[in-house]
Amino acid sequence: MGSEHTTALDTILVVDDEAGIRQSVRGILADEGYRVLEAEDGRGALRLIESERPRLVIVDIWMPEMDGIELLRRIRDSDPMTPVIVISGHGNIETAVTATKLGAFDFIEKPFSLDGLLHVVDRALESHPNGAASGPDGVEVLGNGFAAPLASHPWVQRTIRRSVVANGQGLHSGIRTGLILQPLPAGSGIVFGSISTAATIPARIEYVDSTGYATTLFHDGIVAKTVEHLLAALHGYRITNLLVKMQGEIPIFDGSAAEFCHLIETAGLVDQGGAVDEIVIDRRYEIGDRDGDGEYIAIEPADTFGVHYVLQYPDPVGRQELAFQFGDTADFKREIAPARTFGFLREIEALEKMGLASGGRLHNCILIGENGVVNTPLRFADEFVRHKILDIFGDFYLLGRPLRGFVTARMTGHSDNVALLKLLRQRFELQ
């Protein structure tokens, strides 16, 4: 198998109270050329860390006397530059979020695959554990000023500077869940992963499983629901490489992309070098009847990405129309990201019967009654059409590459977005 990243000086400490687990992990790592140390408890691990200074520590959560979380705290206090991978046989997204908040590089659920473990080990050893702002050679670490015009610059490979986490609730599942965003090397793409398996889902149109009231991805036995608001933020910040660890559904937060923007800015951005080829729209592509009153969406040549959306509902909503040109991240953050998802009170019962909107609450969705909005002040007079543009920003990031073209849409949803994306994928032979 062999890893091109290992050297004889790469020492890894494995901490687990089960001898069988330590032996298995030692065998896997030794075959790859690593020097492996073992400890059966936290105290022994701390002594080895002080004397041997390993480059990486792999820690089990469930151990007597000192559990893995406490050991992680001690390691971070005494040796914050050493990456720590946490493993558990009884983990969940809450445990993974806690470990990541405390500084764990990654969280792996037992039983883990050989390839999955080695992949995480390689990433950990390649990481910058101190999170230094200078970045590795040839990599530009961006500051917190995200207002630089983007349209005049080519897309470059970009990731986040450090891992960030957040807790929330799934809109449709109603389950309390969490989110971990982790940097990935150039060329990795946007990838959704689960804490309970090494399987991942690339954020690509071919893995769209359903589009009923949200965009859901499915691949290799795992599912990622309600991905569009996060993808919109990644699109808005031009992030091209990222691992998104979650459990079933992305948290809804307040129903907009504002919290995702905050997470990204907390993490910081790193330009990794190398251009990202845009998909340049060469002519008009469309789905639906342009001259009718129903659903219609099209994309045509333009200098940058943009959307013109027309929304027409009966009163009290009426007609809303907006054109937004993607000039810079600051515009996206200010004009589009805060727009929240919305729904009509008359539809809530039907959605609940379908097993959807179980997590819909007064704070994460604009509810519209017969006489208008019933639960919150609007952030924009035309917040509904802005949210439709937000959804397009998210869905249209599923081609795996940025688009240069202008979208015109009328009364469309995720299904229409995906139909046009599939047409583009076929036309441009995207793999």
Image (cartoon, rainbow, N blue to C red):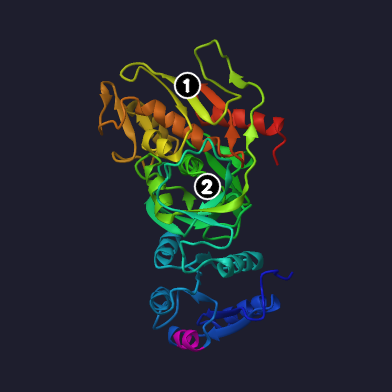
Where residue 340 sits: x, y (%)? 36, 35
Q: Which mark is residue 250?
A: none
Circle 2 sits in a helix, a strand or a loop, which is it? loop
Q: Which residue is mark 2?
A: 239
Q: Identify the magenta region.
A: 44-51
Q: Is residue 243 visible to us here?
A: no
Count neighbours of disc 2 (C-alpha within 10 A) and say few if under 14, some if 14 to 19, many if 20 or more.
many
Residue 409 versus residue 390 in the image, above or below: above
Q: In this view of the protein, can residue 160 be seen by the observer? A: yes
Total marks in image: 2
Q: Position of residue 72 (x, y in %)?
A: 42, 74
Up the image or down, 13 lies above or below 393; here it is below
* Residue 47 highlighted magenta (yes or no): yes
Left of 429 or right of it: where is 345? left
| Mark whose residue sits in front, 1 or 2 | 2
Q: Is residue 308 left or right of residue 184?
A: left
> Badge 1, how many Cα within 10 Å: few under 14, some, many 20+?
some
Give me the residue at 38% from left, 77% from top.
Answer: 77
**In the picture, residue 358 is in which quadrant?**
top left
Three-letter code for the amino acid on which mark 1 is drawn: Met
Q: Is residue 275 above or below residue 369?
A: below
Residue 5 pos. (x, y %):
66, 70
Look at mark 1 in the image and give the residue it sits on.
Answer: 411
